[in-house]
Amino acid sequence: MEVLHNLAFGFGHALTLQNLMFCAIGCVVGTLVGLLPGLGPLSTISLLLPLTYSIPTGGSLIMLAGIYYGAQYGDSVSAITMKIPHASSIVACIDGYQMTLNGKCGLALFTAGISSFIGGTVAIVVLSTMAPALGEVGLLFGPADYCALMLLGFCCVSFVSTGSLLNGLAMAMIGVLLGMVGTDVNSGVARFTMDLPFLTDGIGVISIALGCFGIAEVVKNLDSKNVQTPFNGKISLWPTWPEFKRIIPSALRGSVVGSFLGILPGGGPAIAQFAAYAVDKRFSKFKHEIGSGAIEGVAGQAAADEAAARTSFIPLMAIGIPENAIMALMLAAFIVKGIQPGPNMIATHPDLFWGLVASMWIGNCFLVVLNVPLVRYWLSVFKIPYTVLFPAIIFFCCIGTYSVNNNLDDVLTTAVFGAVGYAFLRLGMEPAPLILGFILGPMLEENFRRQMLLSRGSFMGFVTRPISATLLAVIGALMLWQIWAFVGQMRRRRGGSVLPGVPVTAIPEKG
């Protein structure tokens, strides 16, 4: 009952005309930011941060938060319609874009919108009921635990890859190697930069994502004899009842995964999308369809993105620690207003905390109104002939890449990865595992080296800590299961059996 009282108190502050206006502005700007390739919430919030000096405290924080979680809605539109992702919508390119090619673009966007609403709602419940306790859970994770968590993330390769496991692992390793380009975190020495100054800061994930997905897809369409438009025929928006029943379980699974990963430092939507996709590919009743245009491939990812975006506020407001660059900017906005986030924030500024939590649900409703009914209008833009549309796609890719660092070298890097991504497509190599390896690789290396320094070179810390030991046990079980499934598949192809004396037909197929 206390939580309901606090939420009612928060809605009393969030439902003022002024705060409603700032919430709507944040959601609209966030959606537009998500639609434009490369222009993410990080650069937008950094540009708008000086405006918070002249805006009331509650309204400025509500607006900046709306830009952040509103961008997760808009991210899916460009990924599903044109296969141009942001860092948090890479997985949406797999099944979402395939649904577009199958003439189900409206259904895919509706699924993304509703699933994002479900994910945001679940995360708000978590945020309002368990923020202080869950903030302390994030502090329990040490370098060894993060190493084990990153290794568990690499186990997602077999689920994210739509081709063979060997190809997926190879692509993930290429991503890990690309993630090592730049300045070494511990020694400060430039490595694998080929004496190119712009590579000392590393390769941006935006350049790889836009190149390997967006530009590569454009070149593939131009190379084919039958140039494909983003979608054809009548726009079918509303799902049937059987399709709707497939959305709900996947969205709930993604909400749980995203809510948990959003709490952990270094987590957030970029990692949550891969984890949610892996969970769906393992536990969904329609897992055999995932990768070829399944609703679950869109629903779980969208819900996880939105849930992780909201629960990432828990470490910031509960213990005063930002978990990523965007939360660091939010921390700066708090400090500019003379507020120190932390354990005492709920007691000292209850109107701000509960008003921000309540505004997230109001923003959720705004975003549903913006995205679901207006899907037909979003899609009308893409009825332009492809010969006119593809130059605009490449133009926005270049503008989005340039806007990150205001550097023309990033545009050239994107073009290089566009050629590399096209080669991958021609060879039948899926680029999603490459992005997974690129994101997880540097995090794994940093935490591994940190753990080695703390333990003076001993590996015992990985098995003596309860969290890391449990995660390593889960990894071992998953690897044994994968080996068992692979051996069984090979024996079935050769006409043998998995167990001595047991016919193949008596053994149910797994996976």
Image (cartoon, rainbow, N blue to C red):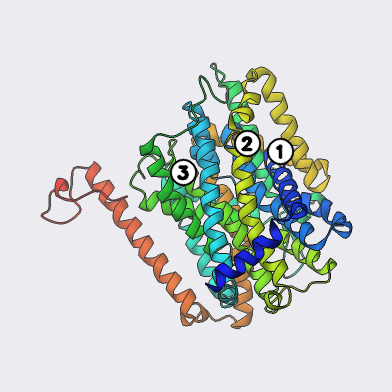
Q: Is residue 127 above or below residue 428?
A: below
**Figure label count:** 3
- Residue 276 pos. (x, y %): 48, 53
Q: CA distance from mark 2 to mark 1?
A: 8 Å
- Residue 67 pos. (x, y %): 71, 50
Q: Earlier in the sequence, mark 3 or mark 1?
A: 1
157 vs 72, left or right, is left
User: Disc 2 residue type?
Assistant: Ser
Q: Is residue 452 above or below residue 90?
A: below
Residue 324 is at least partly visible in this image: no
435 vs 186, left or right, is left
Q: Is residue 390 above or below residue 397?
A: above
Residue 333 is at least partly visible in this image: yes
* Residue at position x 38%, y 61% in the image: 479
453 vs 198, left or right, is left
User: Disc 1 residue type?
Assistant: Leu
Residue placed under numbered mark 2 in the picture: 78
Q: Earlier in the sequence, mark 3 or mark 2?
A: 2
Identity of the residue furthest to the left in this view: 501
User: Disc 3 residue type?
Assistant: Gly
Residue placed under numbered mark 1 in the picture: 36
Q: CA distance from mark 3 to mark 2?
A: 16 Å
* Residue at position x 52%, y 21% in the image: 232
* Residue at position x 70%, y 52% in the image: 66
- Residue 69 pos. (x, y %): 65, 52
Residues marked 2 and 1 touching at CB (< 8 Å): yes
Q: Looking at this view, is 28 or 442 the one in front?
A: 28
Q: Looking at this view, is 460 or 11 the one in front?
A: 11
Q: Secondary structure at mark 2?
A: helix
Residue placed under numbered mark 3 in the picture: 297
